[in-house]
Image (cartoon, helix red, strand yellow):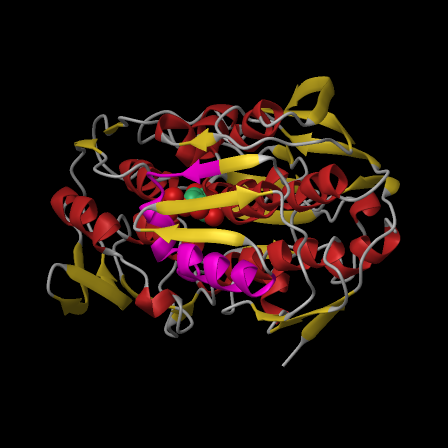
Amino acid sequence: MAKLIIKPIKQIKAEIQVPGDKSISHRAIMIGSLANGETVVNNFLMSEDCLATVKCLGQLGIDIQMANDKCQMSDGCRTIIRGKGLRGLRESKAVLDVGNSGTTIRLLSGILAGQSFTSTITGDKSIQKRPMMRIVKPLRSMGATIEGREEKDQIFAPLKISGGKLSPIKYELPIASAQVKSAILLAGLFAEGETRVIEKVQARDHTERMLAYFGVKNGQEFQGKVVDVPGDLSSAAFFIVAALIAPNSELIIKNVGTNPTRTGIIEVLQRMGAKLEIVDEQVVSGEPRATILVTRSSLRGTNISGEIIPRLIDEIPIIAVAATQAQGITEISGARELRVKESDRLAAISAELGKMGAKIKELDDGMIIEGPTGLKGAKVKSYGDHRVAMSLTIAGLIADGETTIDDTACIETSFPGFEALLRHIQ
Ligand code: S3P
């Protein structure tokens, strides 16, 4: 099993880029497949999760040409999709396997619900434990027939989706989830009439932006486009926090996505006293991007709850690492969703940072962290969760002694080249 061995870092002084945004890369493949003609995706994220989406759409009859397996970010990782239009997908005889990717299974289920054939979709052990009723319920009410392993009020993959004629719905999301919102909106492309999703708290809006960028109008065919994917702020977050807490550090990260539905981490870190500057902001392919300047900072604790939670949901593990170095108490609440991500992130981060000496208390829906604490190197594990693995790696950079993080192959799901970039900035 892959592992990472991390020693304390002396300083970070570098200018870097991070790989393409995962959420946007998935959506470019799916929406490009439903367009007519070529969609060119520049800076596509060549990670296991996004490659799972490519493979599934390939099984559904779409020709997708990958740049090159080893493409560097500087070459743009150009991926070309030959879309076949709204009615162009074909039945896959084989089961669709999303691997570890929650975004693939939930968004693609929305598309499959609108097809005139039956599909079976599943993923790895973690995927088979993640709740699917959140998408199955609205998709069933639009007219799709979906079967799965039903237990109590929940349903789990493998899912058998028999699509067909869908009716539009107006649906108020019971939980803030971009995956659920997107599944319904994508199913809505196949329904006659207007499908509307109402959010109490806004989750990331990449699907809405990309549909608008492609010029999609209800039920009408649309043309392929060029999509330039910005760097993933969720990946940049690990390096941002590293440069805030490592000695004498200065880091420039270019071309990072700064969609306001994702920038909760920047707001929280600034509130904690972080010296973070966002410069050269511009909108490309319907999404804002900018350069982020980071300088080592003294941090102070803060409260994180309410509407900001969905805007930093994936960054809570790395925010917890920052909080161990902040003066005072950081309290995170209203984040129960973290229990149903790739792992139970509240349990995982509390247990593993605890092993490194952090003063951290797990709450039912969050964590309380008291800082600053001098972390110590320890043997920790990822629970097969990429964001837990990378957060612990960053903690290791400022810990006394050596930190071994077990089970780090999962980093490939979202951030190929993470270790190389980490070595590069030292
Ligand atoms: C994502 C939505 C979020 C996020 C995930 C990616 C997306 O999940 O945690 O990493 O691309 O739509 P939820 O919709 O379950 O909150």
Residue 253 visible (yes or no): yes
Left or right: residue 372 compared with residue 313: right
Snapshot quadrant of residue 199? top left
Q: Report the front residue among 245 and 98.
A: 245
Task: Tell me where the magenta segment starts and ends, as one range.
Answer: 330-356
The percent coordinates of residue 108 (x first, y second) are 38, 52
The percent coordinates of residue 377 (x first, y second) are 69, 65
The percent coordinates of residue 217 (x first, y second) are 37, 24
The percent coordinates of residue 393 (x first, y second) are 68, 59
Q: Residue at x 34, y 56 (%)?
A: 340
Left or right: residue 42 compared with residue 48: right
Q: Look at the picture and state if 117 lies above or below 190.
A: below
Residue 280 in magenta?
no
Residue 343 in magenta?
yes
Left or right: residue 366 compared with residue 15: left
Ligand 1 located in image quadrant: top left
> Image quadrant for the N terminus?
bottom right
Snapshot quadrant of residue 141? top left
Q: Residue at x 63, y 34 (%)?
A: 227
Q: Report the front residue among 174 and 140.
A: 174
Q: Report the front residue among 324 and 338.
A: 324
Q: Residue at x 82, y 42 (%)?
A: 247
Residue 57 visible (yes or no): no
Q: Residue furthest bottom?
A: 1
Q: Report the front residue among 59 and 312.
A: 312
Q: Look at the picture and state if 52 lies above or below 247.
A: below
Snapshot quadrant of residue 208? top left
**Total tally of numbered discs in the picture:** 0
